[in-house]
Image: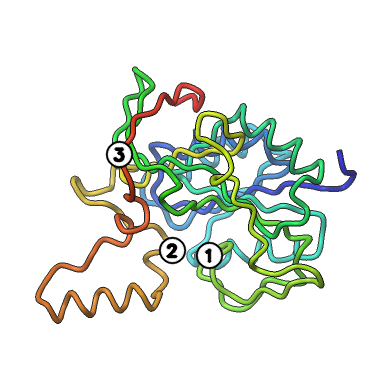
Amino acid sequence: MKSGTKIIGILLAKNEEFFVERAVQNALAFCDEFILVDNESTDRTFEILDGIQKTYPDKVQLHKSRKPGVSHDLIAGFAGTKTWIFGVDGDEIYDPIGLSRMRERVVGGEFDGSWCVFGNVLNVKTLESQSCRATGYLAPPCRSMTKLYNFAAIEAWDGPCQERLHGGTIRFRDGYHEGLRYNFHEENEWEASDFRCLHLCFLKRSSVDPEGRIRQNIMDRHSWHWEKIRDKALAFLRGKKAPNWKEQKYARGPLVEKTVAAFSL
């Protein structure tokens, strides 16, 4: 294994009480350190994160923040070091056994020539914990939303960031650029992938979530991408309901059913 290379996990959560503990627990062994940030949750999310921090005080940091952008400030200083930053959301459950193999590959230098690595994803529509079955949409053909970034490839990632690993300005070191993406999900089938995630984006994730409504993520609430603005404006002019951004990104291709026992749900 390459001496000095670290993996730092960072989670930003707001009202994620149903799945956030499993999201963190499944990713903990993959990381050397883990930073938890609660963004003004009104459910039990902070209580759950506080319990994790107290269980792993030498490995886990816990912060409360009113502004999501603070989560990026906590990792910006790792730019230019032998560090991989692993962003985890409260609705992202990774295969821990797969991550144990993936860790050896990452720390061993297999992906050092890449700026980021995109993993296999199942965007979950229904989940049956007792039977360990889930239905959803795979990436590909959906986009992958995993967040594993090689901070040794950059000089800095600064400027206004809506949250960790989103927005701002990236300055790459010589030999690196944004196009150096390792599309793990395009080279590996779901069942055989070392880097795969259950993305529970279509499920209710907190007792404070309204019934029957797909919730927006923190990034959706704090960013205004030009395509989103365009789609909302066109829908308004046509007298129609604006398209759901999450459905557009994560509900492509056939609906499939998969066994998910490996995720320990």
The 10 Å Cα crowd at callout 3, few under 14, some 14 to 19, many 20 or more, is some
Q: CA distance from mark 3 to mark 1?
A: 31 Å
Residue drawn at the location 66% of the way across and 56% of the way down: 149
Q: Are marks 1 and 2 in contact (CB under 8 Å)?
A: yes
Q: Is residue 66 above or below residue 11?
A: below
Residue drawn at the location 49% of the way across and 37% of the way down: 93
Residue drawn at the location 77% of the way across and 45% of the way down: 110
Secondary structure of the residue carrying tag 3 is: loop
The type of residue carrying mark 1 is Glu
Secondary structure of the residue carrying tag 2 is: helix
User: Quick one: 197 or 111, which is closer to the camera?
Assistant: 111
Q: Nearer the viewer, mark 3 or mark 1?
A: 3
The 10 Å Cα crowd at callout 1, few under 14, some 14 to 19, many 20 or more, is many
Image quarter where the C terminus lies is: top left
User: Pointer 1: what residue?
Assistant: 163
User: Pointer 2: what residue?
Assistant: 219
> Horizontal and vertical percent for residue 163?
53, 65
Looking at the image, the residue that sits furthest to the right is 3
The type of residue carrying mark 3 is Leu
Residue drawn at the location 65% of the way across and 68% of the way down: 178
The type of residue carrying mark 2 is Met
Going from N to C along the chain, the mark reached first, 3 or 1, is 1
User: Pointer 3: what residue?
Assistant: 255
Q: Is residue 146 above or below residue 180?
A: above
Looking at the image, the residue that sits furthest to the left is 239
Q: Nearer the viewer, mark 3 or mark 2?
A: 3
Going from N to C along the chain, the mark reached first, 3 or 2, is 2
